Image: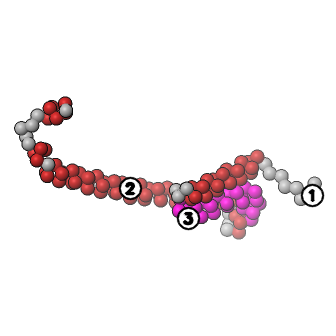
């Protein structure tokens, strides 16, 4: 057959994986679990993965134009860069969440401290704490 395209198992698996992730990205957007910008960024990544899974010879051409020997190395370099960027972003987000949690805990402790000072029963030292637990 002239013009027939033969895909190997790895190409089919990578394409299917990329397509599944592309669909799940837009599903998350539709459910409100992802913003439009985030959905577009992830969609570009998954679409590129699908495209290069079906057209691996193009990654070789691009790699040679940027001075890399093989399309496989280009994909590997890009993957390492993307993973490192994700790691840095996750670290920054974790630090931010940690600071926010610390601030919330402080505010709650201060609020409870003020409530305890305002509650006359909590200041009565003659009360039996065991009796309070029993009731």
Residue farthest front in this picture:
135
Of the image marks 1 and 2, the number of the one nearer the N terminus: 1
Which residue is depicted at the point 71% across and 53% down? 15
Query: Magenta span covers which residues?
Result: 34-61
Instruction: Residue under label 1, please give it.
Output: 2
Q: Secondary structure at mark 2?
A: helix
Q: Secondary structure at mark 3?
A: helix
Instruction: Residue under label 3, please give it.
Output: 36
In the image, is residue 86 part of the stretch drawn in magenta?
no
Question: Mark 2 Cα within 10 Å, few/some/many (few <14, many 20+)?
Answer: few
Of 78 and 18, nearer the camera is 18
Which one is in front in this view, the residue at disc 2 or the one at disc 3?
3
Which residue is depicted at the point 55% across and 56% down? 31
Residue 124 showing in the rendered view: yes
Of 49 and 58, nearer the camera is 49
Residue 87: x percent and y percent? 49, 55
Which residue is depicted at the point 21% across and 54% down? 110
Q: How far is mark 2 from mark 3, CA to CA?
A: 22 Å
Of the image marks 2 and 3, the number of the one nearer the N terminus: 3
Residue 81: x percent and y percent? 56, 60
Residue farthest bottom in this picture:
65
Question: Mark 1 Cα within 10 Å, few/some/many (few <14, many 20+)?
Answer: few
In the image, is residue 60 part of the stretch drawn in magenta?
yes
Instruction: Residue under label 2, please give it.
Output: 97
Of the image marks 1 and 3, the number of the one nearer the N terminus: 1
Of 96 and 57, nearer the camera is 96
Q: How far is mark 1 from mark 3, CA to CA?
A: 42 Å
Residue 70 showing in the rendered view: no
């Amino acid at each position: 057959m002239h013009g027939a395209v033969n895909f190997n198992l790895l190409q089919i698996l990578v394409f299917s994986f990329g397509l599944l992730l592309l669909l799940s990205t837009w599903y998350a957007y539709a459910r409100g679990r992802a913003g439009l910008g985030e959905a577009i960024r992830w969609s570009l990544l998954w679409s590129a993965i699908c495209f290069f899974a079906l057209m691996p010879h193009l990654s070789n051409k691009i790699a040679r134009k940027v001075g890399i020997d093989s399309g496989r190395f280009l994909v590997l370099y890009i993957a390492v860069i993307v993973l490192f960027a994700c790691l840095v972003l996750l670290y920054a987000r974790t630090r931010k969440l940690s600071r926010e949690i610390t601030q919330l805990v402080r505010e709650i402790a201060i609020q409870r401290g003020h409530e305890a000072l305002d509650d006359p029963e909590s200041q009565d030292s003659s009360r039996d704490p065991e009796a309070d637990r029993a009731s």
